[in-house]
Image (cartoon, rainbow, N blue to C red):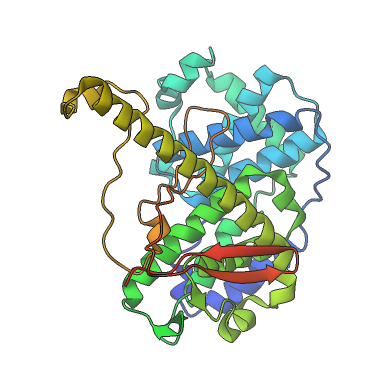
Amino acid sequence: MELEDQWWKGQLAADIYQALRCKELKLPSYRGQSPQLNLRRYFADLIAIICNHFCLCPAARHLAVYLLDLFMDRYDVTMQQLHMVSLSCLLLASKFEEREDRVPKLETLNSLGCMSSMNLVLTKQSLLHMELLLLETFSWNLYLPTAAHFIDYYLSVGVLDGDLHDGWPLASLEKTKLYMAKYTDYFLEVSLQDHIFLCFAPSLVAAACVVASRLVLHLSPSWPTRLQRLTGYAWENLIPCVEKLLIAHDSDVEEASKQQCLEQQQSQALLHSSGQPAAASQFLQLPSMQFAQKAPQACLPASHRSASYSQGSQQSDTQASVACLDPKPSLPSLVYPVSMHYSYQAPCFDR
């Protein structure tokens, strides 16, 4: 489904959106009963790593993972075969969503380091066989909307001049839009990590990503009327999915905070052990030491100023993480009640 660039800004945007919503109603059912369900996260990360390497669009990445989910849900596949299935899903999705010149080539795939670590060599014959099997499984229909297909349409009105931060006008609309796009991209990646999000319609997941981003960025109202009308979802429809996204986000923040504290302790230990300031070369020898770059002073929560959203790593438990710094003591944190079961603590903007 190769759509025109920035279709959500064109005159046919509403018609294309309605076509996607209609197609969404006919998506194959997902049972979540694959015998290899515990391996799903690993292969979803593998797809993300390769997609990032080739700079493939989010729609291709999400479609590839969705094809993998549906195939695993129907077949009992061995570990070795799942590598081939994952790469075939990626190639089919990229052929469907990307321009021809951006589709990964067989020789380039085989030259990747992760391929040698998996002891896997792709051949044209094996790929062709697997692609045909996948196409027959899906009745040659790859027109399968994902959350990534809806997100840009929603973001077209995701942040406007009338929005407020803590009751104040936005300091910079353009920068707020930029951070909004970054956070929605992060939450989209979170939705790929767990098959539980397949229980929700893709358009609802995309809308929930927008809500979660507005909560994190402390924008009000959290779900404005314009977004309700555009998406067709009321606040009550989104709460279950938003809660899952924010819980995953909190887990990322906590993990990143622990990692940052560990790095600080290592740095202090190095200083105390030498009795003098350590040279830069000493820090470079520490494998776990990372130095956060100073982010631009803009409308971003202070606790996320050094946000790092990793969409893929070489570990199987890769998860997008957000580096959490201590908020300014003069700006108290506020709590947004999502429902009676969960409250998300959103730090204030740095003004």
Question: Of residues 142 and 267, which is closer to you in this image?
Answer: 267
Q: Is residue 76 left or right of residue 118?
A: right
Q: Is residue 280 left or right of residue 343?
A: left
Identified at 67% across, 25% down, the residue is 82
Question: Of residues 44 and 159, which is closer to you in this image?
Answer: 159
Eyeballing the image, is 241 above or below 325?
Answer: below
Q: Position of residue 340 (x, y in %)?
A: 75, 69
Question: Of residues 153 and 17, which is closer to you in this image?
Answer: 153
The image quarter in which residue 104 lies: top left
Q: Position of residue 181 (x, y in %)?
A: 44, 63
Q: Tell me the quarter of the image containing the C terminus.
A: bottom left
Q: Position of residue 41 (x, y in %)?
A: 64, 35
Task: Answer whether residue 183 is visible to the viewer in this image.
Answer: yes
Task: Answer whether residue 311 is visible to the viewer in this image.
Answer: no
Question: Of residues 166 and 72, which is closer to you in this image?
Answer: 166
Identified at 26% across, 52% down, the residue is 294
Eyeballing the image, is 96 above or below 346?
Answer: above
Identified at 46% across, 83% down, the residue is 163
Q: Tell me the quarter of the image containing the N terminus.
A: bottom right
Identified at 67% across, 37% down, the residue is 68
The image quarter in which residue 24 lies: bottom right
Eyeballing the image, is 347 above or below 310?
Answer: below
Number of residue marks? 0
Q: Residue furthest top?
A: 119
Eyeballing the image, is 267 above or below 233?
Answer: above
